[in-house]
Amino acid sequence: MKPSIEVERVILARVGRGHDPFYLYDTGIIRVTCRKFAALPYPGCSVYFACMANAHPTFLGIVKDEGLGLFVNSLPHLRHAMAMGFTGEQIVFAASAMDEPTMRAVRDAGAKVNLDSLNQVERWQQMFPGMPFGIRCNIGGLIEAKKTRGGYFIGRESRLGMTPEEFLTLAGERQVTGLHLYVGTDITDIDYFYRCYKILADFAVEFPALTYLDVGGGFGLQDEDGRDFDIHRYGLMADAFMRHVSGRLGRPIRMILEPGRLIGARAGWFVCRVTDTKQRGKRQFIGVNASSAQFPRPLFYPDSARHPVTLLHTNATLNGKPELPTSVYGCSTYSRDFLAHDVILPRAEIGDIIVLGDAGSYCAAAYTHFLGFPQPREVFDDCEPHSRQETTADVLFHTASGV
């Protein structure tokens, strides 16, 4: 998302103070998105933020303050959640290849657990007789699974969860209190969510002690036509679906959601400075004082990760200069060190500022030591209008939309 004038003001106030490159988060946007999920109409809906999207203490503090729990899949994040004051009831844990120390730590924390395999189930029951658990269900053989940005999360191509043939061996088992599903990632097709949920719910009658359906997350920001994910429409679908499930089973069934990227992506921007430029015919290459190791989604998903790019500068003589097809590259010698490809920007000068949007989730959290650059600072600000007057003529900008 293109930064607002207020966000631009905050960025310009912070650059040049030894802080760039850095991430900026608008706390107000995080809160608004949390509240949209918390306001979903089904009364038995519980929302657990997938903290692998952003585990910064300030970010998690906002999530906690807004009444959301946490979905975690590692012991470090479990310990982090507990240190932040999240109680066991506020934590859902699921991971593949769990060992016994991990299981014991999850049990001791009092977190809700979803087990990934029959081996996990056997060990859990041996260690904690009678203690309830959920099971992760791979229903991909019953639907044409979508290949999403992170690959396949259900179906024959996915390693995750148990197939129906596997988890139905647990039918009637009263320790099974939940069915867990993760459809994929970056999905905006609400009908596809519904079809997957319906298949999962068809197995609910096999588990007499069932208390919840955990349908995961995977909510995308925008569809291919640039339309934002319709949380309102999704909420209406989920409400009708869960009321039907509860009515069918004759008791209220809890719905658990695990949104990740959608909670914070639009609230974050990555800010860096132009340090070099190259003109290659009609194409412009902009070098910045940052690396894809510090802004890693384009590094991890080079064919699909696209972020809106904004150029900020204060040299008025550049106003009206022609726009050029542009790539933004990092300050290493690694050939794939690009932060953006195929965007249209005006001609840049050294000292200008590059801002990459939709950077609040799976960006800073995915920082890698590869290439040797330091982890960027993460700055939180409530970017609300303030009294200081400043005209848009003071800052010239242009935005190239991403996908």
Image (cartoon, grey):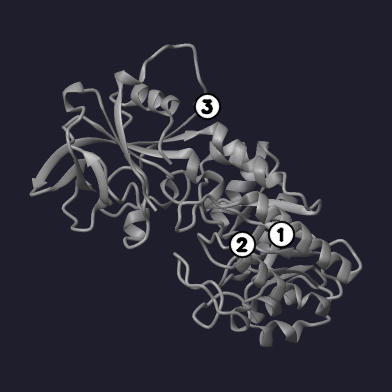
Asked if residue 22 is positioned above or below residue 381 in the image, the reply reads below
> What amino acid does circle 3 point to?
Asp
Note whether residue 111 is visible: no
Image location of residue 315, percent across then percent down: 20, 23
Q: Secondary structure at mark 2?
A: helix
The residue to which callout 1 is attached is: 237
Q: CA distance from mark 1 to mark 2?
A: 8 Å
Image location of residue 13, percent across then percent down: 36, 21
The residue to which callout 3 is attached is: 382
Quadrant of residue 299 within the rendered picture: bottom left
- Disc number lying in front (2 or 3): 2
Q: Residue at x 46, y 52 (%)?
A: 226
* Residue 148 vs residue 297, the one in the foreground: 148
Image location of residue 382, percent across then percent down: 52, 27
- Residue 133 is left or right of residue 287, and the answer is right
Earlier residue among tags 3 and 1 = 1
Q: Residue at x 60, y 51 (%)?
A: 230
Quadrant of residue 191 within the rendered picture: bottom right
Neighbourhood count class around disc 2 (C-alpha, 10 Å): few under 14, some 14–19, many 20 upward: some
Q: Secondary structure at mark 3?
A: loop
Q: Residue furthest right?
A: 250
- Disc number lying in front (3 or 1): 1
Q: Residue at x 43, y 45 (%)?
A: 358
* Residue 349 vs residue 26, the one in the foreground: 349
- Residue 344 is left or right of residue 88, and the answer is left
Asked if residue 198 is positioned above or below residue 399 in the image, the reply reads below
> What amino acid does circle 2 point to?
Ile
Neighbourhood count class around disc 1 (C-alpha, 10 Å): few under 14, some 14–19, many 20 upward: some
Asked if residue 403 is positioned above or below residue 191 in the image, the reply reads above
**Residue 190, numbered label:** 2
